[in-house]
Amino acid sequence: QVQLVESGGGLVQAGASLRLSCTASGRTSNNYVMGWFRQAPGKEREFVAGIRWRDGATYSADSVKGRFSISRDNAKKTVYLQMNSLKPEDTAVYYCAATTYSGFTKDRAAFGSWGQGTQVTVSS
């Protein structure tokens, strides 16, 4: 099992940027795909972006393309979510997750390890 710890959330104004971090420990592996999800109050948890440890290949939700980007630092076992041009509708708890499924899945059920989440609040 891999343990995940997120950081970097906060309160910002619309148009600002934030960078979230997710550091992995425990039984990490290059076979993992790391994902970012978010959950707004009263809504289901939704996929935001993912990255494959092995080769850095990325994929993301249509709603954040062009504004959010995901990257990794293998040496630090850390995945980042760079969020630019933030909107009030981006307000949510953001979760980091890991899956051993090698395909580009957006299905939260495929992710077996989760962090505790970090709050992002965007004011208008």
Image (cartoon, helix red, strand yellow):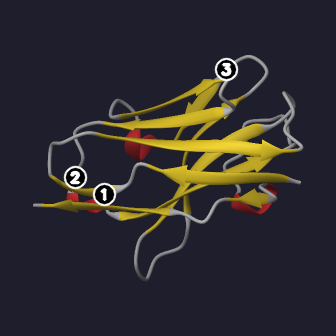
Where, by quadrant of the figure, is residue 123 drawn?
bottom left
Q: Residues within 10 Å of mark 2 (few under 14, many from 20)?
A: some
Three-letter residue code for mark 2? Lys
Q: Earlier in the sequence, mark 2 or mark 3?
A: 3
Residue 87 is marked as 2
The residue that mark 1 highlights is 10
Where, by quadrant of the figure, is residue 122 drawn?
bottom left
Badge nearest the viewer, 1 or 2: 1
Task: Say left or right for 98 vs 22.
Answer: right
Residue 101 in the image: state x and y as whole percent. 86, 42
Screen quadrant of the N terminus:
bottom right
Label 2 element class: loop
Q: Residues within 10 Å of mark 3 (few under 14, many from 20)?
A: some
Task: Say left or right for 92 vs 122.
Answer: right
Q: Earlier in the sequence, mark 1 or mark 3?
A: 1
Three-letter residue code for mark 1? Gly
Residue 60 in the image: state x and y as whole percent. 53, 37
Q: CA distance from mark 2 to mark 3?
A: 27 Å
The residue that mark 3 highlights is 56
Label 1 element class: strand
Q: Please tell me which residue is depicted at 40% across the width and 79% down the height of the picture.
A: 41
Task: Say left or right for 113 vs 27.
Answer: left
Badge nearest the viewer, 1 or 3: 1
Q: CA distance from mark 1 to mark 3?
A: 27 Å
**Observer able to see residue 95:** yes
Task: Say left or right for 24 vs 9.
Answer: right
Residue 75 in the image: state x and y as whole percent. 69, 21
Q: Residue furthest bottom?
A: 42
